[in-house]
Image (tube, coloured by chain):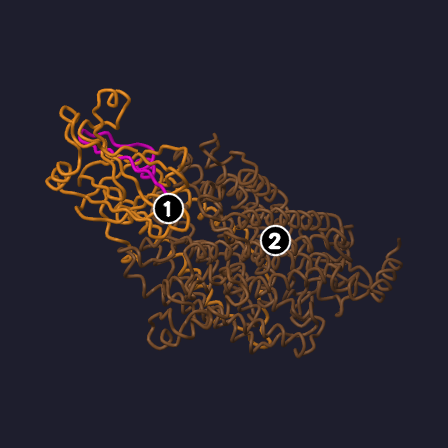
Amino acid sequence: MLDWLPPNVSTYGGEIDYFFYVIYYITAAVFFLVAGAMIFFMIKYRFKEGRRAIYTHGNTTLEIVWTSATVVAMLILAVVSQPLWGRIKQQTPMTQNMATVQVTGKQFNWEVLYPGPDGEFDTAADSAAGTLDDYQVDNDMHVPVNTVVRVILKSKDVIHSFFVPQARVKQDAVPGHTISMWFEITQPGKYEIPCAELCGFGHSGMLGHLYADTPEEYEAWKNEKWPPAAADSANVETPQQQ
Amino acid sequence: MSEATATQKHEAHAHHESFIRKYIFSTDHKMIGKQFLLLGLIMLLLGGGLALLIRWQLAYPEKPLPLLGASKQFVETGDPDTTSSWDMTWMEWLSKDQEEQNWLALNVPQGVITPAFYNAVFTMHATIMIFFVVMPILVGCFGNFLIPLMIGTRDMAFPVLNMLSFWVAVIAGIFMLIGFFVPGGHAAAGWTSYAPLSADPQWTGVDWGQNWWCLSLIVLGISSLMGSINYITTIINMRAPGMTLFRMPLVIWSLFIVAILLLLALPVLTAALAMLLFDRMAGTNFFNPAGGGEVLLWQHLFWFFGHPEVYILILPGMGIASEILPVFSRKPIFGYKAMVWAMIAIAFLGWIVWGHHMFQSGMNPALGFTFMISTMIIAVPSAIKTFNWLGTMWGGNLRFTVPMLHVLAFVSMFVIGGLSGIYMASTPVDMFIHDTYFIVAHIHYVVFGGSIFGMFAAITYWFPKMFGRMMSSKLGKIHFWLTFIAFNCTFFPMHILGVGGHMRRIYNPMQYEFLKDFQGMNEFISISAFVLGFTQLLFLFNVLYSLKRGKQAEDNPWLANTLEWTAIYPIPHGNFSALPAVYRGPYEYSAPEVEEDWLPQTKKLATTAAHGSGHH
């Protein structure tokens, strides 16, 4: 069953897969023990005329043993899962060259907004100085490979869910909330960004693409698409603005 | 009133009942139970049919439905031919009396399910299966039929309320069906109806469909409240002499706990539904962020109801398994008190795990750890129950009757459903498999593998007491094996789809590059689902055939200990000629005191008489 996992391309995806394997082996073992015992009992204790079943109402020691064993196993599983969860969802790693992208779900597209050369989403000051240099496009998300990507996730209408299967990343985009999340892709390539939360009749097929570019590709793409740097942006074509 | 006069009154009453009093507006708990069974089985056909529509679309995306839309060419070559004469005739025939587009042409033009209709179909599949099949049959039918008979009383505490509970459920069912035929189509925001998708018609185009959905569930909530008040009152106050709480059959314990959960959980749903209706119809902004509302509030309310609801669906199945397993193992249940305490633990823990549905929802991730801990811990009572079921089989003398086969399927499938839940409980792993087919597989192993196998076990086990005849064992075994195999072929591969990242609730997986490899598996699942669906017709046939032609049942065909088997068929309104006295627990099989391998709760032995008389 594990072969069906899409090949992992993110830094923490491998760790998620590791927990998946751990749970897989534990649950498979428990299942085969229980099913094995059941089948064994079904054969050994199948009906025989004249045989009398063992008359017992249970065994307190056994109850205590299997209850505490399960409690301990489950608690351990919860406690060891927590640090990874904390690293993925509760903090964004702070590094020097981090890429920031704002993604806004809307029926039925991902609106992707890049801060442009000045590295900041357009502010009132930018607007006053006539230096709007953000770049916005639907469904195409370019990020540099091996770089922490911070995503500011929003929604314009209903709940959507940002999902990159190969990166093991999923986060709902919720109207009225601004949610910060992050990932780091380790393999250059083109990956799909389906919407994973029912968002209306066009939910199926709501699909963006994540391009994890090598540094050269990323520079080339930036040069082609992003508006020029703020200094000489006053008289270039008007950037798309939401 | 003395016992004797009460009996006379009841019996006299029974003889003078008109057809309407006996079969329609009956206040007899047994008839009300049968009415719930009929309601549930009819809705099962509808809910199952909707499931097959889903599976057709996923296996053959955007191909015309067979019969409805398939032309000859499609049948022969697999290519849809939307202009064939056969199709045109069908279209023309449908639009004859209406120049406007008719229902079928709107929802399945040329036999192809539209995306909007698809969303309504899976929404209604889940809604109907949960609220109108599993709950009416397991809680409505068996709660009603079994509680008075198994605790040894004449009827429910409030017979008229009981009757109302059924007819209010029927009204809820009618409301739910109306939704299919209103402009804009039925509710299409999933059975969870997440706001704001569900809260404003502009996001789905669904107008009155969602309103009827809300109204129906509010009305159904009233029905469930009436039922649960009745169950709780009856169980607390009306047990036969000697029937102490810890001599109650485990199925009664499970229904008792379910009634408490219903009583406490449904008002939360009702409140949430009322807020949703106000948002839709009165311009309030509970869930609309533009008006200051909070989107996640719906999810918190819904799952605060929704998680206890999952246990409402599975606890009766657990009770049924605990009831039937000892009978056919000829052995006392292993760890009776552990079984009871496990159910009570579930009833408490069930209230503090709802956040595990919301790990990726935007809820503060710091809460993830809290809900992960509580979710992991709620696995423990389920594990206790499983080990005790195994303990019950150990050293028994197992009879593989049809009900027993269904119970064994229940136990093994519930184990898979329980274990697959652990993946979602672990927050990082959930990040990947949340909202994929993994969760679809999980819930179907719990609700079909658990609740529905429990339902089959219960129907086949209590059929002789309900209808005085035995069900065909041969047909029953064919039905069991086909169901068991087709069930696993349908739902097990869904785990693999989920591991591959296959999202739930998508209309056409072929729209995604990374899911292209799964098309063969989707087709396999669908074919298995069709086999599974049509196999259920065999069960219905067995029920109907056995009603008329089944072998006359003896009073206690399974040689069981519990009180219902002491009632003589046809059981009169009032159940017992004299109220039974109870001398022992319900599972005294192969007890050393007696020669035979069963010892009814009512049998007075010289040695046990002293213990049995103390209770009132």
Which of marks 2 and 1 precedes in the sequence? 2
**Tag 2, which chain?**
B
- Tell whether A43 sits left or right of B588: left
- Which residue is painted at 41% across and 51% down in the image? A201
Region of the chain picked out in magenta, as a range: A83-107
- Chain A, hue in figure: orange
Where residue B147 sits, quadrant-wise, is bottom right
Against B309, is B11 above or below?
below
> Is B419 or B185 nearer to us in this picture?
B185
Where residue B143 sits, quadrant-wise, is bottom right
> Is B400 or A171 nearer to us in this picture?
A171
Against B601, is B370 above or below?
above
Does A161 lie within the magenta span?
A: no
Amino acid under disc 2: Phe
Q: Position of residue A234 (x, y in %)?
A: 17, 25
**Tag 1, which chain?**
B
Tell me the distance, in whole angstroms, between the alpha carbons under discs 1 and 2: 36 Å
Amino acid under disc 1: Asp
Against B286, is B16 above or below?
below
According to the picture, the residue beneath numbered tag 2 turns out to be B175
Residue B387 visible in rendering:
no
Of labels 1 and 2, the one closer to you: 2
> Farthest residue toward the left?
A216
Q: Are marks 1 and 2 on the same chain?
A: yes
- Chain B, hue in figure: brown
- Tell whether B468 sits left or right of A173: right
According to the picture, the residue beneath numbered tag 1 turns out to be B430
The number of numbered discs placed on residues in the rendered structure image is: 2
- Tell whether B170 sits left or right of B15: left
